[in-house]
Structures are given as C-alpha cells and as structure tokens.
Image (cartoon, coloured by chain):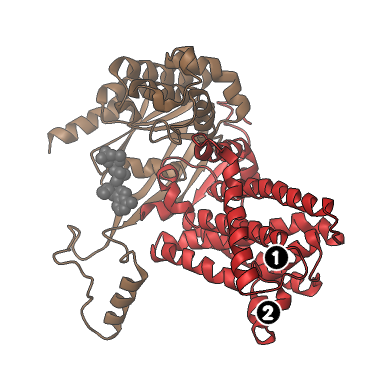
Amino acid sequence: MAAIIQVEGVSKEYRLGVIGNGSLYKDFQSWMAKIRGKEDPWTKIGAVSKFGKRDRFWALKDVSFEVEAGDRLGIIGRNGAGKSTLLKILSRITAPTAGTIRMRGRLASLLEVGTGFHQELTGRENIYLNGAILGMTKADIDRNFDEIVAFSEIESEFIDTPVKRYSSGMYVRLAFAVAAHLTSEILVADEVLAVGDAKFQDKCLGKMRDVSLNQGRTVLFVSHNIGALAKLCNKGILLEHGTLTATGEAAEVIRIYENSLENN
Amino acid sequence: MKAAGNASTGDWDIVITAKDKLLSFDFKELFQYRDLIKLLIRRDFVAVYKQTILGPLWFLFHPIMSTIVYMFVFGNIAKIGTDNIPRPLFYFSGTMLWTFFATTLQKSSDTFIVNAPIYGKVYFPRFSMPIVYAVNSFFTLAIQFVCLLAIYVVYLVSGYSFHPSWWLLATPILVLQTALLSLGIGIMVSALTTRYRDFRNLIHFGLQMMMYVTPVVYPMSEVPARLKPLVMLNPLTPVMELFRHALLGGGEGNLTLWAVSLVETAAVFWLGMRVFNHNERTFIDVV
Ligand SMILES: Nc1ncnc2c1ncn2[C@@H]1O[C@H](COP(=O)(O)OP(=O)(O)OP(=O)(O)O)[C@@H](O)[C@H]1O
Ligand SMILES: [Mg+2]
C-alpha cells in the first residue's frame, strides 16, 4: 500500500513567554529604551525562562515518517513531547517552521468534541453544523443522520430541542456520535476520549477500529492511555522532546516507551 | 471526492509547507465549504434573534431612530441641505449603507480574536468567517431596503416625483464594493489585533472619524470647496453619492471618481487578504 500521509523534515519553533507586550504603546516604550541604551521598562523581574536567555523553543525537530492508508497510528510520548503540536500541524491549525507534509484525501481533526456547537441551536442543527465544521458536506450528513442519532442514544424527542437543555452526558454523546461518523479518509484524534464514560469510550474506540478495518480509513491517535492505544493501533511512533525516536509496530513502540519510562 | 483507501493513484490532495505563497488564495476550497458557510450564517442569525420578540424588526430600530435624530440635528438645527431629496429618505439611505459598512468592518476586525477557540481546534478556510459577517450584515441591509421602499411609496402616493437614473443598475456593484472595502480594512485590522490589542480600541474611534468624511448626513454639494479633496479621498464617498443618486436622484454620478474608488477598493482588499492569509498560518501560536 502507498503512503497516504508523508511527513518530511517537519520542525516547529515556538516563541516563549509574552510575545511583544501585546500593546503598541508598551512595545514603543521598549523600543525607545533600546535605542537610547536604557533598560527596557517592561522587562519582567525574574523572567528568565528555563531555557536560559533563549526565547525560542523547538517543539518538533526534523520529524519524518509515513503513514499507509488504513493504518491506525498511535502517537506516543510524555507530556510536552510535541504530540499535540504534530497533530495541529497535520490539521492545518498552525503552519510548520520547516518541512513539508503531503496527504491524500480529506482530514478531519478531533482535537476536542463538539467544536462549534451552539447552545441556542437544536441537536439536529448542531449535528449539521458540527459535521460541516469537521469537513462533511450536507449530503454526507443527510445520509448518516439517522445513524448518528442512533449512535448517540439520545431519545428522538430531544433531537429538536436546543442543546442547552441537554444534560452534559447527552451533549458529549451527540458530539461523539458526529465524530464517529465522519466521512474523511484521515481521522486525527487527540485525547478526546478522555471525557466520555468508560462504556461510551469503548464504543467509540470500537467504532474507530471498525471504520479503519472495514473502510480502509486512516486514524492518527494520541493518548496517554496505553490500554486504549494497544487496543486501537497497529502502528506507532514515539516522540521525545520533539524528536522522533522510534517507529514501527504499535506493540513494539509501546514497549520501548514503557522501558524509557522505567529507566527515568 | 475520493473513495477511502484509494490512495495509490493521483496527486497529493493537501500539501502543507513552511512558507506561504504570495497571492495564494484558494477559491475552490472556499466553494467546497459552502455548506459550512451557509450553516454558520444561519447560526449567527438564529443566535441573535431566537430570543427576541421583535426578531428581525430590530434591524429597523437603529436606522429609524438615527434618521429621526439626524432630521432634527442636521436638518432643523444645522440646516444642511439634502440635494432636494426628502430628508427621511436622504438620511435613511445614508445610514443604511453606512451601517452595512461599519458593521461588516467591525465584525470582521474581530475575526481572529473571537474565533480563536474554534480556529484552534479545526481547520476550515479562515476567510469563511468574514464572509459570514458580510452576508449577515447584508441581510440587515436588505430588510432596511424594504423599509426604504415603504417610505418611498408614501412619498409617491402623496404626489412626490423621483428621478432615478440608469445608475440604478449599478447598485448591486455599489453594495458589493462597500462589502469588499469594509472586509479589506476589517481583516487587515483583525490580523493586526492578534499582535496589538490597541487596534481594537481604535476601530470604534476610526469609524466615527471616517463617518465625518463620508457623505452620510450631508451631500457632497454642501461640502465647502477647500474640504472637498479630503472627503473625496475617501473611497466610500463616491459609493455613497452614487447609491443615493441611483435610488433617489439628486446629486450627480461621477464616473471618474467612482473608477478611482474602485481601484482603491481593490487595492485595500488585496492588501487585506495578503495580511490575513499570512497571519492565519501561525496566529494561533500567540493568542
Ligand atoms: N503556542 C505555544 N507557544 C509556545 N510553546 C508552546 C505552544 N504550544 C505548545 N508549546 C510547547 O511545545 C511543547 C510541546 O507541546 P505539545 O502540546 O505538543 O505537547 P504534547 O506532547 O501534546 O503534551 P501532552 O501529553 O501534555 O498533551 C511543550 O513544551 C509546550 O509547552
Ligand atoms: Mg497534548
């Protein structure tokens, strides 16, 4: 099978601390002070970052890998390793500082459930809105509508009620149900399953596995839940401080990750 | 649309690079997201009016009140002429186009800050939001237009005669130009505000200043000669004058001035798109 995603030498640099002073007037004062060789009046006392004098920081360094169509790739790493940054770049939420990414088909990103839900709109209206935000066309949603409602287990009389009258559980279920029925070729999910109840989480994992196995959909999945990763993913990559340190079968990468945790 | 798994053939669909291309704007992509744009328009519309009793009638409250105040202040006290156009029609038409301009500009200048939560979670063409704002202010304009027609009819019935010109055919272009001009300025400011919040405070003041140099409450013919260049520099001036001339007669249609303002509008819009497109790539890192 050919690659559906090709990540080539991707790096991401973030600027740390407060960028500028957020105010034209203060930036102007800092700038004047610099010209006259005086001390910047807006330097914060004790504001030396843990990265010393540098105010820039590489969240990803020269990351390259490929994903084949139908793979369920687990992205593994400790807090701050750069997993979310990688997903954000893949989702086109932020641009990389260097490198190139090529993809086939459409990508839907689930960095949160219920993005764009509006309290005043009904469940039905929100299904359409949320689906469209995640890249579905109206026709896609029409076709999947009944299935989405069934999956959410929301009683049909509630579907035309504004979601502000929903219990928080109903709200999350509806949001998940839309996500589970996305039609894009690539699905990217970042720890989103952490919110639902355990049973519903299992149902969602099962559904993701299903769409990948039966419809050849590609899934990129970030989670700290090793159990969920092992259940869902067949491939894995390991990120450490922004660098890619292992790729391969999911079980193998998980083992490397667990070893590295023990050695620290 | 491609079937899932059919990945071995064809070119890449999405290519992400570190540098943005100059002059890259993806109209095709915007079209692909048309269903989303429609739903967002509906969402904004419904969100505002679901809980008011008068609903869309509120759209008429503001221009009617402004017209009454202007008639009193500029008509009765300052005694500024209106090119022989009945005062209610003169002020109402001016207010309605000005409000369209100002609302679109104000809303679109908040694009990045207001939408940061959603822009930070999912990708869709960032320019969809300013489009939504412009279309929603256009609905307001359309409702106000019906009200303008009603006043018009009252004058016709009471024996008043109007002399609309062939310029009437140009009104859709005038409205579109107003939209592009306000969007151009708005999205430029929206990019600047992600760095300097100051610009947000300036917008309100800036709009107020701009209204003084736009013939909203006075016609060009009442402007003293030495101030004329200042008012004419404003690309909205010929648009406003022509809009009234087209609908109500009075004043004159100056083709040269309009041509200049069209060029200015195109330049502002292009520059706005440049700044917006550049900013949308990484703004989320710093908000
Ligand atoms: N907008 C930003 N500006 C500056 N630094 C950032 C920004 N976003 C993330 N970072 C930094 O980049 C690094 C990687 O962050 P990222 O969110 O990708 O980590 P992660 O692997 O998802 O961690 P976690 O498991 O905790 O979610 C972190 O050190 C974080 O502080
Ligand atoms: Mg994360």
Using residue A216 as the reference point, say whether residue B218 is left or right of it: right
Q: Residue B3, can we see it? A: no
Q: Check the rendered structure and report the hue given to chain B.
A: red
Question: In the picture shown, does residue B256 fall above or below A168?
Answer: below
Count of residue discs = 2
- Regarding mark 1 in the picture, which secondary structure is present there? helix
Any atom of ligand 1 within 8 Å of the CB at mark 2? no
Work out whether residue A160 or residue B249 is closer to the camera in this orientation and state it.
B249
Amino acid type of disc 2?
Val
Residue tagged 1:
B240
Dot 1: chain letter: B
Q: Residue B286, can we see it? A: yes
* Of pointers 2 and 1, the one earlier in the residue sequence: 2
Image point 60% across, 42% down: which residue?
B57
Residue tagged 2:
B223
Using residue B254 as the reference point, say whether residue B264 is left or right of it: left
Question: In the picture shown, does residue B9 fall above or below B98?
Answer: above
Dot 2: chain letter: B
Which chain is depicted brown? A
Dot 2 alpha-carbon crowd within 10 angstroms: few under 14, some 14 to 19, many 20 or more: some
Image point 54% across, 26% down: which residue?
A183
Residue B37 percent across, percent down from the top left: 59, 40
Residue A189 percent across, percent down from the top left: 39, 32
Using residue A91 as the reference point, say whether residue B29 is left or right of it: right
- What separation in Å lies between label 2 and label 1 (alpha carbons)? 14 Å
- Regarding mark 2 in the picture, which secondary structure is present there? loop
Residue B91 percent across, percent down from the top left: 67, 62
Work out whether residue B196 or residue A62 is closer to the camera in this orientation and state it.
B196
Dot 1 alpha-carbon crowd within 10 angstroms: few under 14, some 14 to 19, many 20 or more: many
Dividing the picture into quadrants, the one containing residue B70 is bottom right
Image point 71% across, 65% down: which residue?
B239
For the C terminus of chain A, the image quarter is: top left
